[in-house]
Protein backbone atom coordinates (compact mmCIF):
# COMPACT_ATOMS: atom_id res chain seq x y z
CA UNK A 1 0.00 0.00 0.00
CA UNK A 2 1.58 3.32 -1.01
CA UNK A 3 2.01 5.89 1.73
CA UNK A 4 4.03 8.97 2.47
CA UNK A 5 4.49 11.57 5.14
CA UNK A 6 2.78 14.84 4.43
CA UNK A 7 4.99 17.54 2.98
CA UNK A 8 4.58 21.28 3.33
CA UNK A 9 2.11 21.19 0.43
CA UNK A 10 0.73 17.87 -0.79
CA UNK A 11 -0.92 19.27 -3.90
CA UNK A 12 -2.22 17.45 -6.96
CA UNK A 13 1.03 15.71 -7.87
CA UNK A 14 1.31 13.96 -4.51
CA UNK A 15 -2.31 12.88 -4.42
CA UNK A 16 -2.16 11.71 -8.02
CA UNK A 17 0.64 9.36 -6.99
CA UNK A 18 -1.79 7.88 -4.48
CA UNK A 19 -4.30 7.27 -7.25
CA UNK A 20 -6.61 10.26 -6.71
CA UNK A 21 -6.82 13.44 -8.77
CA UNK A 22 -8.77 16.60 -7.98
CA UNK A 23 -10.52 16.56 -11.37
CA UNK A 24 -11.12 14.21 -14.28
CA UNK A 25 -12.22 14.53 -17.88
CA UNK A 26 -15.61 13.21 -18.98
CA UNK A 27 -17.18 13.06 -22.43
CA UNK A 28 -20.40 15.10 -22.47
CA UNK A 29 -23.11 16.10 -24.92
CA UNK A 30 -23.40 19.88 -24.79
CA UNK A 31 -26.49 21.69 -26.05
CA UNK A 32 -27.11 25.38 -26.59
CA UNK A 33 -30.53 25.84 -28.09
CA UNK A 34 -30.49 23.55 -31.13
CA UNK A 35 -26.71 23.52 -31.35
CA UNK A 36 -25.11 20.25 -30.23
CA UNK A 37 -21.49 19.32 -29.62
CA UNK A 38 -19.73 16.33 -28.09
CA UNK A 39 -16.65 17.26 -26.11
CA UNK A 40 -14.49 16.55 -23.09
CA UNK A 41 -15.48 18.37 -19.92
CA UNK A 42 -13.56 18.80 -16.67
CA UNK A 43 -15.32 17.32 -13.63
CA UNK A 44 -14.39 18.09 -10.02
CA UNK A 45 -13.72 15.08 -7.81
CA UNK A 46 -14.93 14.58 -4.25
CA UNK A 47 -13.26 11.79 -2.32
CA UNK A 48 -13.98 10.35 1.14
CA UNK A 49 -11.21 11.54 3.46
CA UNK A 50 -11.07 9.82 6.85
CA UNK A 51 -9.24 11.65 9.62
CA UNK A 52 -7.75 9.20 12.10
CA UNK A 53 -6.39 10.52 15.40
CA UNK A 54 -3.93 8.35 17.33
CA UNK A 55 -5.20 5.28 15.53
CA UNK A 56 -8.93 5.95 16.02
CA UNK A 57 -11.20 7.11 13.16
CA UNK A 58 -12.89 10.37 14.03
CA UNK A 59 -14.69 11.69 10.95
CA UNK A 60 -15.07 11.05 7.23
CA UNK A 61 -15.44 14.13 5.03
CA UNK A 62 -16.07 14.36 1.31
CA UNK A 63 -13.41 16.70 -0.03
CA UNK A 64 -11.18 17.55 -2.96
CA UNK A 65 -8.03 15.44 -2.47
CA UNK A 66 -5.48 18.28 -2.41
CA UNK A 67 -3.64 20.11 0.37
CA UNK A 68 -4.60 17.41 2.84
CA UNK A 69 -2.06 18.46 5.45
CA UNK A 70 -3.58 21.93 5.53
CA UNK A 71 -7.08 20.43 5.66
CA UNK A 72 -6.25 18.10 8.56
CA UNK A 73 -4.47 20.84 10.51
CA UNK A 74 -7.18 23.43 9.88
CA UNK A 75 -9.97 21.01 10.81
CA UNK A 76 -8.11 19.99 13.97
CA UNK A 77 -7.70 23.63 15.02
CA UNK A 78 -11.15 24.94 14.19
CA UNK A 79 -12.90 21.96 15.76
CA UNK A 80 -10.98 22.49 19.00
CA UNK A 81 -9.23 19.11 18.78
CA UNK A 82 -5.86 20.80 19.28
CA UNK A 83 -5.04 24.23 20.65
CA UNK A 84 -1.96 25.06 18.60
CA UNK A 85 -0.18 23.93 15.45
CA UNK A 86 2.61 22.52 17.65
CA UNK A 87 0.16 19.89 18.90
CA UNK A 88 -0.25 18.58 15.35
CA UNK A 89 2.64 16.19 15.87
CA UNK A 90 2.62 14.29 12.56
CA UNK A 91 0.43 13.17 9.69
CA UNK A 92 0.65 10.31 7.21
CA UNK A 93 -1.52 9.83 4.16
CA UNK A 94 -2.60 6.40 2.91
CA UNK A 95 -4.51 5.35 -0.17
CA UNK A 96 -7.42 3.04 0.59
CA UNK A 97 -9.75 1.21 -1.75
CA UNK A 98 -12.52 3.81 -1.54
CA UNK A 99 -10.76 6.94 -0.40
CA UNK A 100 -7.85 8.46 1.49
CA UNK A 101 -6.88 8.01 5.11
CA UNK A 102 -4.99 10.71 7.01
CA UNK A 103 -3.38 9.37 10.18
CA UNK A 104 -2.75 12.21 12.61
CA UNK A 105 -0.75 12.09 15.82
CA UNK A 106 -1.75 14.48 18.62
CA UNK A 107 -0.78 14.63 22.31
CA UNK A 108 -2.47 12.01 24.48
CA UNK A 109 -4.13 14.70 26.59
CA UNK A 110 -5.88 16.11 23.52
CA UNK A 111 -6.79 12.64 22.31
CA UNK A 112 -8.41 11.83 25.66
CA UNK A 113 -10.61 14.92 25.30
CA UNK A 114 -11.43 13.98 21.71
CA UNK A 115 -12.72 10.52 22.62
CA UNK A 116 -15.25 12.14 24.96
CA UNK A 117 -16.86 14.16 22.16
CA UNK A 118 -18.82 11.27 20.66
CA UNK A 119 -18.65 12.54 17.09
CA UNK A 120 -20.10 10.27 14.45
CA UNK A 121 -18.14 9.43 11.33
CA UNK A 122 -20.00 10.90 8.37
CA UNK A 123 -19.64 14.39 6.90
CA UNK A 124 -21.10 15.46 3.57
CA UNK A 125 -19.35 17.89 1.27
CA UNK A 126 -21.53 20.85 2.18
CA UNK A 127 -22.02 20.34 5.89
CA UNK A 128 -20.33 22.27 8.64
CA UNK A 129 -21.62 20.66 11.83
CA UNK A 130 -21.31 17.12 10.55
CA UNK A 131 -20.95 14.57 13.28
CA UNK A 132 -21.85 16.85 16.19
CA UNK A 133 -23.87 14.77 18.62
CA UNK A 134 -24.91 17.45 21.13
CA UNK A 135 -26.08 21.06 20.92
CA UNK A 136 -23.17 22.16 23.10
CA UNK A 137 -20.72 20.54 20.72
CA UNK A 138 -22.35 22.11 17.67
CA UNK A 139 -22.80 25.66 18.99
CA UNK A 140 -19.36 26.50 20.36
CA UNK A 141 -18.63 30.08 21.41
CA UNK A 142 -15.29 31.41 20.13
CA UNK A 143 -13.24 33.77 22.29
CA UNK A 144 -13.55 37.51 21.57
CA UNK A 145 -11.83 38.72 18.41
CA UNK A 146 -9.40 41.60 18.99
CA UNK A 147 -7.94 42.03 15.51
CA UNK A 148 -6.92 45.57 14.60
CA UNK A 149 -7.02 44.96 10.85
CA UNK A 150 -8.12 47.96 8.79
CA UNK A 151 -9.18 47.59 5.15
CA UNK A 152 -10.30 50.19 2.66
CA UNK A 153 -13.23 49.61 0.35
CA UNK A 154 -10.83 49.99 -2.57
CA UNK A 155 -8.58 47.22 -1.24
CA UNK A 156 -11.59 44.93 -0.80
CA UNK A 157 -12.82 45.69 -4.33
CA UNK A 158 -9.37 44.99 -5.79
CA UNK A 159 -9.18 41.61 -4.03
CA UNK A 160 -12.64 40.63 -5.23
CA UNK A 161 -11.70 41.53 -8.80
CA UNK A 162 -8.59 39.35 -8.57
CA UNK A 163 -10.23 36.35 -6.93
CA UNK A 164 -11.55 34.57 -10.03
CA UNK A 165 -8.11 34.47 -11.64
CA UNK A 166 -6.74 32.73 -8.51
CA UNK A 167 -9.32 29.91 -8.64
CA UNK A 168 -7.53 27.61 -11.06
CA UNK A 169 -9.54 24.47 -10.27
CA UNK A 170 -12.87 26.26 -10.38
CA UNK A 171 -11.99 27.76 -13.76
CA UNK A 172 -11.67 24.20 -15.07
CA UNK A 173 -14.69 22.63 -13.40
CA UNK A 174 -17.06 25.37 -12.22
CA UNK A 175 -17.86 23.33 -9.09
CA UNK A 176 -15.28 24.47 -6.56
CA UNK A 177 -15.38 26.87 -3.61
CA UNK A 178 -12.41 28.95 -2.59
CA UNK A 179 -11.16 30.65 0.56
CA UNK A 180 -8.61 33.43 0.07
CA UNK A 181 -6.20 35.10 2.50
CA UNK A 182 -5.89 38.79 1.69
CA UNK A 183 -3.40 41.29 3.06
CA UNK A 184 -4.59 44.85 2.39
CA UNK A 185 -1.35 46.17 0.91
CA UNK A 186 -0.52 42.99 -1.03
CA UNK A 187 -3.90 41.70 -2.18
CA UNK A 188 -4.62 37.97 -2.35
CA UNK A 189 -1.68 36.07 -0.89
CA UNK A 190 -2.99 32.49 -0.64
CA UNK A 191 -5.99 30.55 -1.92
CA UNK A 192 -7.29 27.08 -1.11
CA UNK A 193 -10.01 25.35 -3.14
CA UNK A 194 -12.39 22.49 -2.41
CA UNK A 195 -15.81 21.18 -3.40
CA UNK A 196 -16.92 21.96 0.17
CA UNK A 197 -16.92 25.55 1.39
CA UNK A 198 -15.99 24.51 4.93
CA UNK A 199 -13.19 22.33 3.61
CA UNK A 200 -11.77 25.21 1.58
CA UNK A 201 -11.79 27.39 4.68
CA UNK A 202 -10.21 24.68 6.83
CA UNK A 203 -7.48 24.23 4.22
CA UNK A 204 -6.74 27.96 4.23
CA UNK A 205 -6.74 28.19 8.03
CA UNK A 206 -4.47 25.14 8.20
CA UNK A 207 -2.08 26.84 5.79
CA UNK A 208 -2.03 29.97 7.95
CA UNK A 209 -1.28 27.86 11.03
CA UNK A 210 1.39 25.81 9.31
CA UNK A 211 3.23 28.84 7.97
CA UNK A 212 2.92 30.83 11.19
CA UNK A 213 0.99 33.65 9.56
CA UNK A 214 0.09 36.63 11.77
CA UNK A 215 -3.71 36.59 11.62
CA UNK A 216 -3.82 40.30 12.42
CA UNK A 217 -2.31 41.18 9.05
CA UNK A 218 -5.16 40.11 6.79
CA UNK A 219 -8.71 38.96 6.21
CA UNK A 220 -10.61 36.16 4.47
CA UNK A 221 -12.84 36.05 1.41
CA UNK A 222 -15.00 32.97 0.80
CA UNK A 223 -16.91 32.18 -2.40
CA UNK A 224 -20.03 31.03 -0.59
CA UNK A 225 -22.61 32.17 1.89
CA UNK A 226 -21.44 33.07 5.39
CA UNK A 227 -22.94 30.31 7.49
CA UNK A 228 -22.65 30.07 11.25
CA UNK A 229 -19.78 27.60 11.13
CA UNK A 230 -17.81 29.73 8.67
CA UNK A 231 -17.98 32.61 11.15
CA UNK A 232 -17.20 30.22 13.99
CA UNK A 233 -14.06 28.84 12.33
CA UNK A 234 -12.80 32.31 11.40
CA UNK A 235 -13.41 33.73 14.86
CA UNK A 236 -11.71 30.78 16.57
CA UNK A 237 -8.54 31.72 14.68
CA UNK A 238 -8.77 35.34 15.86
CA UNK A 239 -9.23 36.74 12.34
CA UNK A 240 -11.13 40.02 12.43
CA UNK A 241 -12.81 40.24 9.01
CA UNK A 242 -14.74 37.67 6.97
CA UNK A 243 -16.06 38.54 3.52
CA UNK A 244 -18.58 36.31 1.75
CA UNK A 245 -19.71 36.46 -1.86
CA UNK A 246 -23.25 35.50 -0.84
CA UNK A 247 -25.50 36.19 2.12
CA UNK A 248 -24.91 35.44 5.80
CA UNK A 249 -27.40 33.57 7.95
CA UNK A 250 -29.05 35.09 11.00
CA UNK A 251 -27.11 32.82 13.35
CA UNK A 252 -23.86 33.81 11.63
CA UNK A 253 -24.65 37.51 12.13
CA UNK A 254 -25.44 37.01 15.81
CA UNK A 255 -22.23 35.08 16.41
CA UNK A 256 -20.15 37.68 14.54
CA UNK A 257 -21.76 40.43 16.63
CA UNK A 258 -21.06 38.60 19.88
CA UNK A 259 -17.44 37.74 19.11
CA UNK A 260 -16.41 41.08 17.59
CA UNK A 261 -15.94 39.81 14.03
CA UNK A 262 -16.58 42.11 11.09
CA UNK A 263 -18.90 40.25 8.72
CA UNK A 264 -19.49 41.35 5.13
CA UNK A 265 -21.82 39.68 2.66
CA UNK A 266 -22.94 40.08 -0.96
CA UNK A 267 -19.41 41.22 -1.80
CA UNK A 268 -19.26 41.48 -5.58
CA UNK A 269 -17.43 44.02 -7.71
CA UNK A 270 -17.80 47.34 -5.89
CA UNK A 271 -20.86 46.33 -3.86
CA UNK A 272 -20.99 44.85 -0.36
CA UNK A 273 -23.12 44.81 2.77
CA UNK A 274 -21.54 45.22 6.21
CA UNK A 275 -23.50 43.35 8.88
CA UNK A 276 -21.38 43.67 12.02
CA UNK A 277 -18.55 45.77 13.45
CA UNK A 278 -18.07 48.12 10.48
CA UNK A 279 -15.05 49.90 11.99
CA UNK A 280 -12.56 47.61 10.21
CA UNK A 281 -13.71 48.69 6.74
CA UNK A 282 -13.20 52.31 5.71
CA UNK A 283 -14.89 54.06 2.79
Image (cartoon, helix red, strand yellow):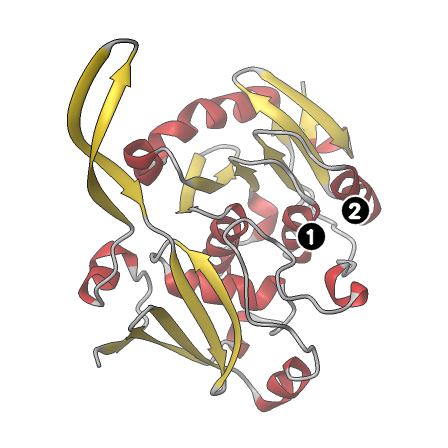
Q: Secondary structure at mark 1?
A: helix
Q: Position of residue 257 (x, y in %)?
A: 82, 41
Quarter of the image with the C terminus is: top right
| 92 to the left or right of 38 | right
Which is more toward the observer, 141 or 237?
141
| 174 to the left or right of 41 | right
| 39 to the left or right of 62 | left
Does residue 85 sit above or below 161 in this rendering? Answer: below
Q: Residue 114, labelled with which disc?
A: none
Crowd band around label 1 with a 10 angstrom C-alpha radius: few (<14), some (14–19), many (20+): many
Residue 256 shows in the view: yes
Instruction: Report the residue at 43% width, 61% height from top.
Output: 70
How many numbered circles does the render carry? Answer: 2
Q: Are marks 2 and 1 in contact (CB under 8 Å)?
A: yes
> Which residue position holds label 2?
255
Q: Name the image quarter holding residue 99.
A: bottom left
> Which residue position holds label 1?
232
Residue occupying the far top of the picture = 34
Instruction: Report the residue at 76% width, 61% height from top.
Output: 140
- Separation of disc 2 and disc 1 at Cα? 7 Å
Residue 211 shows in the view: no
Mark with earlier residue (2, 1): 1
Amino acid sequence: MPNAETSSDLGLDFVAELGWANYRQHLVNRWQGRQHSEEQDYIAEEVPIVLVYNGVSHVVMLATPTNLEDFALGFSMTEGIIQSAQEFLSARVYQRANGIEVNIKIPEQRFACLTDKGRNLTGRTGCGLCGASTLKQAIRQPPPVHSGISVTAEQLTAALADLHSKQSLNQLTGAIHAAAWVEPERGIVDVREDVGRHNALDKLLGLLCRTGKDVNTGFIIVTSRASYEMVQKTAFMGIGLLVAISAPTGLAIRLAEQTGLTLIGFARHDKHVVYTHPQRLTH
